[in-house]
Image (cartoon, grey):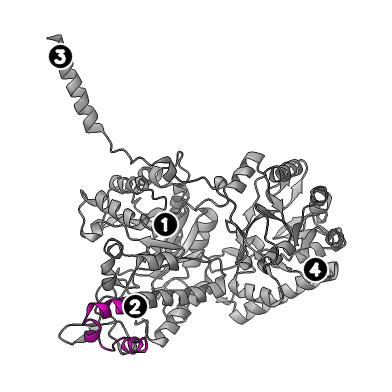
Amino acid sequence: MMTVYRSALLIMALLILNACAVEAPPFTPPAQRVVEPGENPWPKGKVLVLGYHDVEDATADQAFMSVRTANLAEQFAWLKANGYQAVSVDQILAARKNGPALPDKAVLLTFDDGYSSFYERVLPLLKAYQWPAVLAPVGVWVDTPAGQKVDFGGLPVDRKRFLTWQQVSEISRSGLVEIAAHTNALHYGALANPQGNLQPAAVTRLYDAQRGEYESEADYSTRIERDVKQISDKIQAATGRKPRVWVWPYGAASGTALQIVGEQGYELALTLEDGMSTLSSLQDGPRQLINGDPDIGRFADQVTGVEASPLMRIAHVDLDYVYDPDPQQMDANLGELVQRIADMRISTVFLQAYADPEGDGLVKSLYFPNRHLPMRADLFNRVAWQLRTRAKVEVFAWMPVLSYDLDPSLPRVQSWSEDGRVAVSTEQYKRLSPFDPKVRQQIGEIYEDLARHTNFTGVLYHDDALLSDFEDASPAALAAYRKAGLPGDIASLRADEDTLQRWTRYKSRYLIDFTHELTAKVKAIRGPQIKTARNMYAEPILNPYSETWFAQNLDDFLAAYDWTAPMAMPLMEGISKEDSNAWLDRLVKRIAERPDALSRTVFELQARDWSTPQGKPIDTELLVQWMHRLQWNGVRNYGYYPDDFINDQPRLQEVRPAFSNAWHPLP
């Protein structure tokens, strides 16, 4: 009897364990596991740039991003002991011109602002090691007469904290130190929008609150030209040499200013972007900011981890949720958003820069000043800056490519039907024809206005950049096909498989070329550091032939953009919840077949079920399950759309452990 009882208990326990069992992640063989960045060979032609500021003996005042002298000495010793080699600007420029190659573990040491500690504490260390470095003073701070306070971005600071021009001259004569420019008088926060945000003066079109107007492009260029000439002349007077290195105040770059800097003879420009500088991109050189007075362990982690692949975790946010005609309510909404994103501890927000209150995807107004559409509110710059400075995330401007409600006379994408009729296509989005030069010009000007009036890290191109196998049949499109050697009518283009596929490839590349054109306009104003991402439908990934129906191609996207953002939305594709995990498995597998593709792909999950009335929120538990499924398949970069911060959807406390960059252990 006891044996039967024990057997029954055992069976019951097994049943309970089976009911509670959770599917285990797949086993990854050691040879296929990710190699830690510090274990990889040093990449050829790259240099690690370290950005220091003040150096103090007893304290490390973070108002000046100071490190203590003892810690700096220990960091230098660690670099030398671990094979790092300090290089000069001359060595970098020579290597770029096919001269002697840079050594492995090349490091460029830079010191910003022009503190007297460089003369007193840093220069003796450099002489002891015989290491070169770059010193970048701010002109008006060094100009300040003895006995007066230095206006340190609005904070009065003792003059003794900063170098004199005589000391700068002596430092230059050491033969170890390159004197760079860190602006003459633009190292401060300037009024950047009606809401009162202060942003780096060197990259901002100033906002005049009295007139309610922004600085013109001509006035901005004049202001930058004057500043660059003033600091260049001061450095040449002190050193006898024209400066060659420009160091952006606050690390914030501007494409317009970069052109002016280049015309003044500067050959390097250094930001505070993450990563390493390459010889091919010295005009937007990243630097690792050394702040917080790191001990040797944290310093070593920062140096060895510099080439770590970025972990992209994104929340895709509708700015329409923030907007409210009542300014007080709108500010309260913004506070809710910023706090939620800060609590999530993620890396990135894809932030809507256009208004779409009707939800039909046709853009009738924008959230920034522009030449072609009404401005619903001057809001994007305000929200993007608050997210960047308070929530510590990068912000991509989420922008349509074609679906703008511009002048009715502009041609729209037209669809051909097999009975020969041609009509403006309303399938998915009502789009402007990208084959018309006036359309391209006006959309390009919208992107230019975005770049001039707002501050952001990158651009996300919306999913409206598509053309079906019946589009575009507008006259401008047909003329473009003929010019490319294709038939000039849709019936002939669809007449045989070979012609259909050549037409498909032409359209796919054409749309990419158009986004490249838009990117170039943005970078010309904001700077070459701007990143790009583009939404992609899942079907062309799972079924490559369906490129015919979308004019989207995975290999094209991976080659064209910094990030490919597939819409990993199973319910939107008609997949049941029960089959959604298997569908995600297939999607990831298709992308992972391309070498290194997962490191350049960010999967966007759906947080709403648009097949239900009013798009019912997806249960957070299911969203978390999808996140885990992606991780099990080797995906590290993912996010979701939309984030409803007003109604806590998805539920923050439940989604954060599967999503946050700061959750330990990392999911």
Disc 2 to disc 3, how far (Cα)? 72 Å
The spot of residue 39 in percent (x, y) is: 55, 45
Mark drawn on residue 5: 3
Distance between mark 4 and mark 1 Cα atoms: 48 Å
Q: Nearer the viewer, residue 555 or 282?
A: 555
**Contact between labelled residues 3 and 2, with CB atoms less than 8 Å apart:** no
User: What SS does tag 1 mark?
Assistant: loop
Disc 1, disc 3: CB below 8 Å? no
Q: Residue furthest top?
A: 1
Looking at the image, which residue is at 31% across and 48% down?
A: 626
Identify which amino acid the numbered label 4 is placed on.
Ile
Q: Nearer the viewer, mark 4 or mark 1?
A: 1
Q: Disc 1 designates what residue?
A: 595
Return the residue nearer the eye: 534 or 640.
534
From the viewer's perspective, tell me whether residue 308 is left or right of residue 359: right
Left or right placement of residue 368 versus residue 420 in this view:
right
At mark 2, the secondary structure is helix
Rounded to the nearest angstrom, the CA distance separating label 4 from label 2 is 52 Å
Q: Amino acid at mark 2?
A: Lys
Q: Amino acid at mark 3?
A: Tyr
* Quadrant of res 209: bottom right
> Image point 64% across, 53% down: which residue?
289
Left or right of residue 385, residue 167 in this image? right
The crowd level at tag 1 (other Cα within 10 Å; few <14, some 14-19, many 20+) is few
Name the amino acid type tagged 1.
Answer: Pro
Circle 4 or circle 2, nearest the eye:
2
Residue to which mark 2 is pinned: 507
Checking the image for residue 235, the label placed there is 4
Q: Which comes before the other along the chain, label 2 or label 1? A: 2
State yes or no: discs 2 and 1 in contact (Cβ < 8 Å): no
Residue density around tag 2, few if under 14, some if 14–19, many if 20 or more, within 10 Å? many
